Amino acid sequence: MSPRDDIPDLKGRDGEGSVQVHQDPESRIEGAKVISVYGKGGIGKSTTSSNLSAAFASQGRRVLQIGCDPKHDSTFTLTGRLQPTVIDILKEVDFHPEELRPEDFVTEGWGGVQCVEAGGPPAGTGCGGYVVGQTVKLLKQHHLLDDTDVVIFDVLGDVVCGGFAAPLQHADRALIVTANDFDSIYAMNRIIAAVQAKSKNYKVRLAGCVANRSTATDEVDRYCATVGFNRIGHMPDVDAIRRSRLKKKTLFEMDDDPDILRCRAEYLRLAEALWAGTDPLAPAPMEDRDIFELLGFD
């Protein structure tokens, strides 16, 4: 027997030869715009996600943010503290979810944003996709998605199997956070390829990218022009964003100054654009050799 003979009908279901965990139809998120935020590790996905959630909330949207990283700091600036993870809470009740109440795993943050940290299994011991799936299942069982306008998944940086891919099974749009440098754009290129594979069998489409902590955007724009992608946001490299993290706050709670007002306005504009609906993009990711030729050498 070959390694896959006992797994039915795999080929082509989730990208050629994929063996990723598939979505339970009963766990499908309905009635809300679902956005998954991706990017290289340390690029500012959690800062982007939390400020985007705050922007949606300030516009009157009902928002749920789900952190999908064992580090569980996605919602840190919305709530002012690290939240316990769903996987840790499930361990406490010996994985009997019927014993949990919503307040055990959901915290209300700034502007009424509902905050959940899915967490993840210890390194090398399990699949992050399982954790995301259990989190969504819990939210549905407690009807916490019924009155939600926007769901934002803040996803771990590495392009891995289930933990990376599971939010894409729920998302309408994938937003990529990058910077104006080779490593960030190289990671974005790989993420584009992964999302494109998922889009063959799921509704998710690419929304575009946000240039984060970048004074210039010339390299990002050059890459986008080459592959047919769009930059739909630009967060400048200003100290106000770093200070907001230190103060455990989103930019929407910080005292007004020109840099904060500028960044706040950009998040509000981005939220409006995503709410109105971005064109579904289908860029053609580059081969490694080609992206090095485009960006990797002077």
Image (cartoon, rainbow, N blue to C red):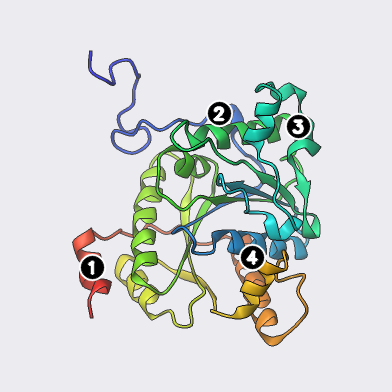
The residue where tag 3 is placed is 142
Residue type of the residue flagged with mark 1? Phe
Residue at 61 percent across and 48 percent down: it is 72
Please tell me which of labels 1 and 3 falls first in the chain: 3
Name the N-terminal-most of marks 2 and 3.
Answer: 2
Q: Nearer the viewer, mark 1 or mark 3?
A: 1
The part of the image, by quadrant, that contains residue 217 is bottom left
Could you tell me the amino acid type at mark 3? His
Check disc 1: other Cα within 10 Å, few if <14, some if 14-19, many if 20+: few
- The quadrant of the rendering that contains the C terminus is bottom left
Q: Which residue is mark 1?
A: 292
Q: Nearer the viewer, mark 4 or mark 3?
A: 3
* Residue of label 4: 271
Q: Which residue is mark 2?
A: 25
Is tag 4's residue or tag 3's residue first in the polypeptide sequence? 3
Viewer-side residue, 203 vs 295: 295
Location of residue 128 with respect to 231 vertically, above or below: above
